[in-house]
Each structure stands twice: as structure tokens, then as C-alpha cells.
Amino acid sequence: MSSKDPLKLVALDEEDLKIVSAHVQDAIVKVADILWSPREGTFIVPMNRFAWEETQGSRRRSGNQRHRSVLHFDKVRAARSIGVTPGDPEAVLSVLAVLFAPGDAPAGAINIVCSGDVTLRLEVDYIEGRLTDLGAAWSASMRPKHRLGRV
């Protein structure tokens, strides 16, 4: 995959989900943009994804890019948010990780963990997700920083 190719990933198991999680770390999500369709069993998260795969060792600001992307899950039985009001037009989330908590196999819960003690919890029949970039990247003014060990 070259830096010009849009990212297209499929997650069908926990290992796949870990790869998707790495690619959505530090993505920015507007809560009001999230689409949950109980009837269709779909949960769609539009986001501005930081392209960590483009930075590979670069410390230059010119290597910082974001992509408009969509994280899409099927076979979702229930969805709830913890720590944020659904549909709040002002709420913005920063994604930290996407984790799977097994239940009665192959069912379980997909947890989209965000900063500020926010979690989007999806009860799923099984893992079926996609991450897709929607177009060209744009320059990001800064690279997300994580300070470990600070309270």
C-alpha cells in the first residue's frame, strides 16, 4: 500500500480488530455524526483519522496527516454510550482504542474507548467491521502526544 492509496481494512476477529484499533488511535469523532441503526444492526462512526502509518519515524510536521474515514460495524444488537450524551452536537471524542470483550462465542462487546472516560459499547453477534478512508489526506498541524505515567 502506498501513501496515496486509501486504507481499507476488514475486522472479522479479535486480531483484526487490534489492527483496526491501531489505525484509529487519536481519531477525532463528533458525537452528533455517529449513526446507530437498531433496525439494520449497523453502527457507523465517521472520523478524522490520524495517519500513524504515514509518520513512520518522521519527526517532521510535514509527515503529519489526517484522513476522513468511516469505522463501520454490522451485526450490532445494542449500543450505548458511557460518559457522553448521545447526539450532543458539541461533543467531540478522541479515540484511544477499539477492544473486544468476549461473551458467548462468537458474541461479545466491542468497546470504542475514548479520552475523558468515554466508551461506546456495542453488543455484537460477532465481529464484523470495516475501516475505510474516504479520500485524500490533508496535513495535520500537529502530531498527537501521549504522556505515560502522568495523572
Image (cartoon, helix red, strand yellow):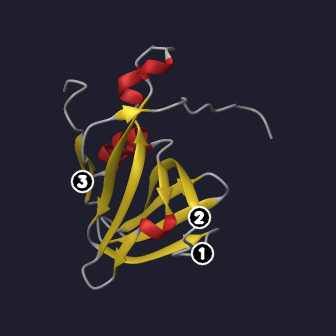
Q: Specify the amino acid type for callout 1.
A: Thr
Q: CA distance from mark 3 to mark 2?
A: 30 Å
Work out whether mark 1 precedes mark 3 in sequence or the reverse, and give the earlier one. Answer: 3
Whether residue 50 sits left or right of residue 44 in the image: it is right
Residue underneath mark 2: 91
Whether residue 89 sits left or right of residue 102 in the image: it is right
Work out which quarter of the rendered image holds the C terminus and state it: top right
Q: CA distance from mark 1 to mark 2?
A: 8 Å
Count the numbered circles shown. 3
Tell me if mark 3 has few (under 14), some (14-19) or many (20+) residues whose alpha carbon lies within 10 angstroms of its own.
few
Q: Are marks 1 and 2 in contact (CB under 8 Å)?
A: yes
At which x and y percent is residue 21?
A: 41, 44
Q: CA distance from mark 1 to mark 3?
A: 29 Å
**Numbered label attached to residue 12:** 3
Q: Nearer the viewer, mark 1 or mark 2?
A: 2
Q: Are marks 1 and 3 in contact (CB under 8 Å)?
A: no
Work out which quarter of the rendered image holds the N terminus and state it: top left
Residue underneath mark 1: 85
At which x and y percent is residue 74?
A: 26, 68
Q: Quadrant of residue 142?
A: top right
Residue that protrudes farthest toward the right in the picture: 151
At numbered mark 2, what does the secondary structure look like: helix, strand or loop? loop
Q: Specify the amino acid type for callout 2.
A: Ala
**Numbered label attached to residue 15:** none
User: Which of 28 and 1 lies nearest the eye of the viewer?
Assistant: 28
Work out whether mark 3 precedes mark 2 in sequence or the reverse, and give the earlier one. Answer: 3
At which x and y percent is residue 82?
A: 60, 70
Q: Are marks 3 and 2 in contact (CB under 8 Å)?
A: no
Residue 97 vs 91, above or below: the answer is above
